[in-house]
């Protein structure tokens, strides 16, 4: 432990995160008044950004918390927690992207890019592809995620994909945003049980609003219209598997995004226009 300077911060306003408080940790991180004590060695090994911070910064130039260097993070506490859990688990080979929900994956992906943890970044990207495939063929045989993405999590993922310029997955995320007829009124939904909310970005809000109108045109022009086409875009996500429900969506109009070898190998050509639909 370094000897703390006279202005050492032991503020009681900070909230320790017990499961991310390592008594043998050598650095303390703070995000929105939440503090985490972790082994700096993990960051030096996996993060190019933090490797530079820890090897170049001098302790007397840092803030302190109970005798340890304090690093203030300008990120949400939720995102910081997801990242710290991921980087610790990844080091111990206990963290798997396919086990995480899409909120955690989006958070870790964004901070991994910011803090240059390449292995985690690509792992999160692969995990998101399990829920938001970049093309219709990828839907065939895809494994359903352990938890159906909530509307708020879809908003969050769409925002992150837009910010990170991951445009091949963005249309799929926006498609799932289209399934709500109520939440899109203000583009705001509850993200966590604690009441944290997420606001769909202005660009994504505009894309969804115009995209829904274009998608509706495809449903209206279905060559074999049925009652199912009138409920666009209900169940589009459930159509990932042909046996997802007893009465599958129409296999011809874009409302279904449905493809199966049983349907004469017909792929919906509208999928190829996804990027232009949501541009």
Image (cartoon, rainbow, N blue to C red):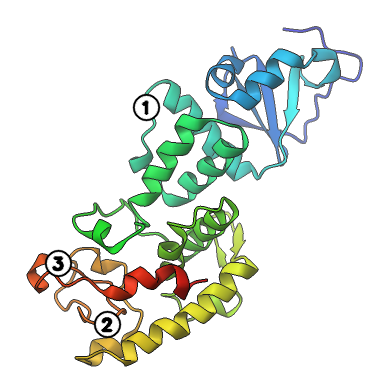
Q: Position of residue 102 (x, y in %)?
A: 43, 51
Q: Which residue in the structure is indicated by mark 1?
A: 94
Residue 253: numbered disc: 2
Q: Residue at x 33, y 42 (%)?
A: 98
SS class, disc 3: loop
Which quarter of the figure has residue 77? top right
Q: Is residue 124 above or below residue 182?
A: above
Sequence order check, earlier mark of 2 and 1 = 1
Q: Is residue 154 above or below residue 257?
A: above
Q: Is residue 55 left or right of residue 170?
A: right
Q: Is residue 170 left or right of residue 56?
A: left
Q: Position of residue 124 (x, y in %)?
A: 43, 41
10 Å neighbourhood of mark 1: few (<14), some, or many (≥20)? few
**Numbered disc in front, either 1 or 3:** 3
Sequence order check, earlier mark of 3 and 2 = 2
Sequence order check, earlier mark of 1 and 3 = 1
SS class, disc 2: loop
Q: Is residue 271 above or below residue 96?
A: below
Q: Residue at x 30, y 51 (%)?
A: 146
Q: Is residue 26 above or below residue 143?
A: above
10 Å neighbourhood of mark 2: few (<14), some, or many (≥20)? many
Seen from the viewer's position, the closer of residues 195 and 230 is 230
Q: Which residue in the structure is indicated by mark 3?
A: 260
């Amino acid at each position: 432990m370094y000897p703390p300077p006279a202005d050492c911060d032991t503020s009681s306003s900070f909230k320790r995160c017990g499961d991310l408080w390592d008594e043998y940790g050598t650095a303390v991180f703070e995000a929105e008044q939440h503090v985490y004590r972790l082994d700096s060695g993990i960051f030096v090994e996996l993060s190019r950004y933090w490797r530079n911070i820890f090897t170049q910064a001098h302790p007397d130039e840092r803030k302190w918390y109970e005798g340890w260097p304090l690093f203030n993070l300008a990120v949400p506490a939720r995102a910081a927690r997801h990242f710290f859990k991921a980087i610790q688990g990844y080091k111990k080979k206990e963290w798997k992207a396919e086990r995480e929900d899409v909120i955690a994956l989006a958070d870790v992906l964004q901070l991994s890019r910011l803090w240059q943890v390449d292995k985690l970044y690509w792992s999160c990207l692969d995990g998101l592809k399990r829920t938001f495939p970049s093309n219709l063929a990828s839907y065939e045989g895809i494994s359903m995620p352990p938890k159906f993405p909530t509307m708020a999590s879809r908003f969050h993922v769409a925002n992150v994909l837009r910010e990170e310029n991951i445009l091949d997955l963005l249309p799929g995320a926006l498609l799932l945003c289209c399934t709500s007829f109520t939440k899109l009124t203000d583009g705001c939904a509850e993200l966590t049980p604690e009441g944290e909310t997420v606001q769909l970005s202005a660009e994504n809000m505009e894309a969804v609003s115009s995209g829904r109108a274009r998608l509706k045109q495809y449903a209206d022009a279905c060559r074999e219209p049925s009652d199912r086409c009138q409920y666009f875009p209900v169940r589009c996500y459930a159509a990932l598997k042909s046996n997802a429900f007893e009465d599958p969506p129409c296999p011809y109009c874009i409302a279904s995004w449905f493809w199966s070898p049983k349907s004469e190998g017909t792929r919906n050509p509208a999928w190829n226009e996804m990027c232009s639909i949501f541009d």
